[in-house]
Image (cartoon, grey):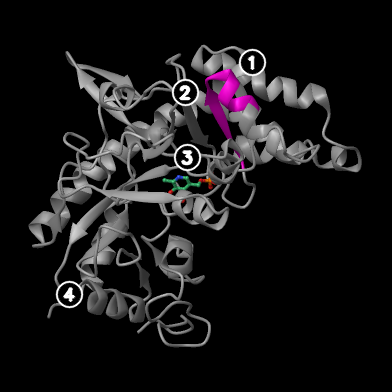
């Protein structure tokens, strides 16, 4: 028992039982300050160079965000992905993109599950008809029965929480005339592949592909450790981008968000992302080995900054880990998963050793 830690069941520990609205449950609700955090997929703390960028702009908060700041952020994104500026919108976090998708007024949206639940939640809240296509383990797209009349399709790549990385070609194959395919690449910047002995960054990203109806959401939150800032962007078919943003308020994102996006997509930020991708890969390899050696079942071939584990006693174990001051992500709130899975953020070996020391045996 860690003194001072709020435990499951305490008033300060949210969602001890099944949350009333499972689609609204996110990893941050599984953590309270002081816990060893395996529940939230944010990489450490905000890097010092990015704090400097943000600090340098605080005095500018006495004026409205400027067109020059927006243009600089858009130009950085365009440069990073080889896109035109008309194909880009800066967002208040990738999550904003799901809400903006409702502006497309889809007649029939399809969400691929198990996956991040926000798209389904916000589309339903906007009155959109939503069908869930639940993939069976190992959660690959091949053979997915996607209704022909789906005019909006949302899919995560890599997918949270399964850590599956779909081939880019499988995503492109989902495109149809009259359909918008919205690919959530919130974690794509930490994906890597080894090809002929060389490491290839973002091997399955479609952010650089120009196809009618294809749009991609990207997040600055995770890799740059700024969840409190709310920064991300949308890139893709310019007609779709324009339709999604048409009803946004003036000044949809603030000066600090624009500065962070510009920095994250600039040379320092891109180096940072590349370094994080390599760290994630190394940490994940070591973590999977440690988990497996300890008898914990890692699902599939994880490719993101989190791993899914199968555990028949997942809910019981989560409560006991919380009592020991360790937060893990419940997975019973993900449609298509159940109370026999947990999601663990990729962490360094010292933290994983602490997790395993706290791991209760039945
Ligand atoms: C798969 C996925 N997409 C999008 C988001 C939202 O990202 P952001 O914080 O940039 O809004 C999250 C946040 O947890 C996520 O897990």
First of labels 1, 4 by sequence position: 1
Callout 1 secondary element: helix
Q: Earlier along the polypeptide chain: callout 2 or callout 4?
A: 2
Residue 163 sits inside the magenta stretch: no
Quadrant where the N terminus sits is bottom left
Q: Nearer the viewer, mark 1 or mark 4?
A: 1
Q: Earlier in the sequence, mark 3 or mark 4?
A: 3
N-terminal-most mark, 1 or 2 = 1
Q: Is residue 112 above or below residue 296?
A: above
Q: Is residue 240 magenta?
A: yes
Mark 4: few/some/many CA within 10 Å (<14, 14-19, 20+): some
- Residue at numbered disc 2: 213
Instruction: State if disc 2 and disc 1 touch (CB < 8 Å).
Output: no
- Segment colored magenta: 231-242
Q: Which mark is residue 85?
A: 1
Q: Which mark is residue 313?
A: 4
Which mark sits nearer the N-terminus, 3 or 1? 1
């Amino acid at each position: 028992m860690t003194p001072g830690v709020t435990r499951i069941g305490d008033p300060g520990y949210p969602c001890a039982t099944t949350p009333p609205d499972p689609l609204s449950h996110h990893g941050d609700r599984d953590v309270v300050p002081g816990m060893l955090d395996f529940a939230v997929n944010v990489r450490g703390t905000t890097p010092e160079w990015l704090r400097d960028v943000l600090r340098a702009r605080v005095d500018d908060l006495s004026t409205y965000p400027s067109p020059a700041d927006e243009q600089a952020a858009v130009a950085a994104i365009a440069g990073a992905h080889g896109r035109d500026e008309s194909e880009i919108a800066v967002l208040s976090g990738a999550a904003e993109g799901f809400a903006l998708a409702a502006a497309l007024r889809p007649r029939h949206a399809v969400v691929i599950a198990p996956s991040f639940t926000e798209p389904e939640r916000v589309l339903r809240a906007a009155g959109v008809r939503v069908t869930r296509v639940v993939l069976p383990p190992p959660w690959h797209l091949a053979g997915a029965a996607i209704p022909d009349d789906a005019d909006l399709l949302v899919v995560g790549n890599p997918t949270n929480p399964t850590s599956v990385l779909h081939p880019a070609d499988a995503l492109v194959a989902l495109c149809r005339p009259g359909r918008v395919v919205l690919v959530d690449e919130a974690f794509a910047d930490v994906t890597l592949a080894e090809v002929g002995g060389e490491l290839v960054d973002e091997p399955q990203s479609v952010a650089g592909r120009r196809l009618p109806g294809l749009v991609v959401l990207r997040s600055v939150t995770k890799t740059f450790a700024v969840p409190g800032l709310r920064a991300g962007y949308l890139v893709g078919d310019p007609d779709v981008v324009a339709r999604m943003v048409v009803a946004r308020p003036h000044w949809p994102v603030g000066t600090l968000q624009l500065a962070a996006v510009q920095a994250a997509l600039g040379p320092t930020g891109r180096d940072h992302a590349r370094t994080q991708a390599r760290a994630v890969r190394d940490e994940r390899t070591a973590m999977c080995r440690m988990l497996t050696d300890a008898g914990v079942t890692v699902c599939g071939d994880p490719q993101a900054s989190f791993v899914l584990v199968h555990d028949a006693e997942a809910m019981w174990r989560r409560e006991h880990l919380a009592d020991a001051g360790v937060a893990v992500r419940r997975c019973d709130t993900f449609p298509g998963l159940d109370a026999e899975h947990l999601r663990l953020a990729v962490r360094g070996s010292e933290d994983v050793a602490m997790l395993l020391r706290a791991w209760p045996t039945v």
